[in-house]
Amino acid sequence: MLDTRAGRSGGIAVVRAEDLKAGARTNPMAELVFHMHSDASEGWFGQVDAMDACYRATFNYYGVMGEPGRIHCPEDLTPLRPIPLPPRVDPFVESYLHPEDAP
């Protein structure tokens, strides 16, 4: 579940996450697949059909690479539950995670 209004409502969820083992900061390091769902509803202009769509986004160290693209949804649309991160990473641990940034 994403910590947004849409995520809490079930309208958008991450359904797949893959570690791509980048090797360099500019190479793809992770890929996420998002599922978006909207129930059928009655609107100002008549009936609006239910909608399901999935998008793939690839990331490197600097952020999203290019534009997320629409894909066929995977069969399993079970939302992933992220592991909670600590509120702050100790500087000693951070120096091992990113030794190039250490003093």
Image (spheres, rainbow, N blue to C red):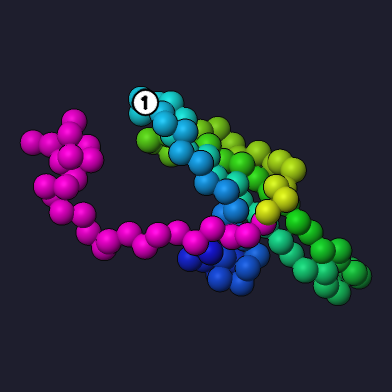
Q: Please identify the quarter of the rendering in which residue 61 is found.
A: top left
Q: Secondary structure at mark 1?
A: loop
Magenta span includes 88: yes
**Is 68 located above or below residue 39 in the figure?**
above
Amino acid at dot 1: Gly
Q: Is residue 35 left or right of residue 32?
A: right
Residue found at the far front of this picture: 76
**Is 31 located above or below residue 91 in the figure?**
above
Mark 1 — residue?
A: 23
Magenta residues: mostly which secondary structure? loop
Which residue is drawn at the image coordinates 86% and 63% (left, top)? Answer: 49
Which residue is drawn at the image coordinates 47% and 33% (left, top)? Answer: 20
Magenta span includes 95: yes
Q: Position of residue 100 (x, y in %)?
A: 18, 31
Q: Please identify the quarter of the rendering in which residue 60 is found.
A: top left
Q: Which residues are magenta?
A: 77-103
Q: Is residue 54 left or right of residue 25?
A: right
